[in-house]
Amino acid sequence: MIVVYKGVNIFYTEKGIGSTVVLLHGFLENLTMWNGLVEEVSKRNRVITIDLLGHGKSDCLGYVHTMEDMAEAVKQVLTHLRIRKAIFVGHSMGGYVSLAFANKYLKNVKGICLMNSTAQPDDDERKEIREKANKIVRKNFNMMVKMAINNLFASTSKELFSNEIEKVLNEALKTPVRGYMASNEGMRLRKNSEEVLEQIQKRIIIAGKEDPILNYESIKREATRTNTDLKVLDNGHMSHIENKKELLETLLEFIRS
């Protein structure tokens, strides 16, 4: 299904009835990343999945997709569906978007799960990496995407989940270059959202102990600073693949609580 936001199409799906749960994918992903979880979550909930700007079947809006831009597109979907309050589960970049949404529409947020995500901004090193990637991706898109996807998994997962990794890569390669660059720049520009996280009554961070992207010790300190529940899983940045069963149990418990 499609809604229009600022003249561009935003694609979403809807399944189930009950309390609303909004699932937001990460960078170089799309709403299909949730296919293995939607069936269970939608048994007792109304589940909305959304292709964020420049990903999946949603169009690019400009040359920079700020987290606020993406959050406004999400708000457009929820307004169209007449949804007033929801629990947000954001994977990686989807967590940044969830926090940007909460910063402006706190009364519409019942809870937030930062799944392999953080309220912290990029450090200087990460910002530099994003700038370099955006320069390289114009000429070597496939190489950059393959490198990015490979770097999401714990070393022990790469052989064990080789088939799943191939599927993730194939979906990632569907992302337009402009979508890659606009979102990468948007993530580089984002600010610290720990104060926003603290305002959300129901909140949890799900972290991978071997996450190659987000340092586990840093996430642990963030959870302590913000008094946020922390669920630690083995493996890397892709808990929906590397720790699917435990992740699903954690999400269902969080949604029910």
Image (cartoon, rainbow, N blue to C red):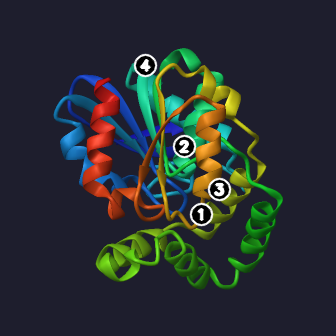
Q: CA distance from mark 1 to mark 3?
A: 16 Å
Please report contact status of discs 4 and 1: CB closer than 8 Å, yes or no: no
Residue 7 visible in the current orientation: no
**x 54%, y 31%: residue:** 228
Q: Give the x, y percent position of residue 5.
A: 56, 37
Identify the residue under disc 2. Answer: 95
| Label 3 secondary element | helix
Circle nearer the viewer, 2 or 4: 2
Question: Would you say 171 lies left or right of 62 here?
Answer: left
* Image position of 157 with respect to 48: above or below: below
The answer to whether the residue labelled 2 contacts the one labelled 4, judged by CB atoms less than 8 Å apart, is no
Report how far apart the C-alphas of labels 4 and 1 lie in the structure: 31 Å
Quadrant where the C terminus sits is top left
Q: In this rendered view, identify the residue nearer to me: 58 or 235.
A: 235
Residue position for label 1:
213
* Sequence-first tag of 1 and 3: 3
Badge 4 is on which residue? 85
Crowd band around label 2 with a 10 angstrom C-alpha radius: few (<14), some (14–19), many (20+): many
Q: Amino acid at mark 1?
A: Ile
At x 52%, y 46%, the residue is 94
Amino acid of disc 4: Lys
Q: Earlier in the sequence, mark 3 or mark 2?
A: 2
Whole-angstrom CA distance, mark 3 to mark 4, is 26 Å
Residue 19 placement (x, y as % from top left) = 29, 22
Please tell me how crowded label 4 is: few (under 14), some (14-19), or many (20+) other residues with Cα within 10 Å. Answer: some
- Whole-angstrom CA distance, mark 3 to mark 2, is 13 Å
Residue with the mark numbered 3: 183
Residue ranking furthest to the left: 43
The amino acid type found where label 2 is placed reads Gly
Tell me the residue at 30%/35% (across/down): 47
Residue type at tag 3: Ser
Residue 52 against residue 85 in the figure, above or below: below
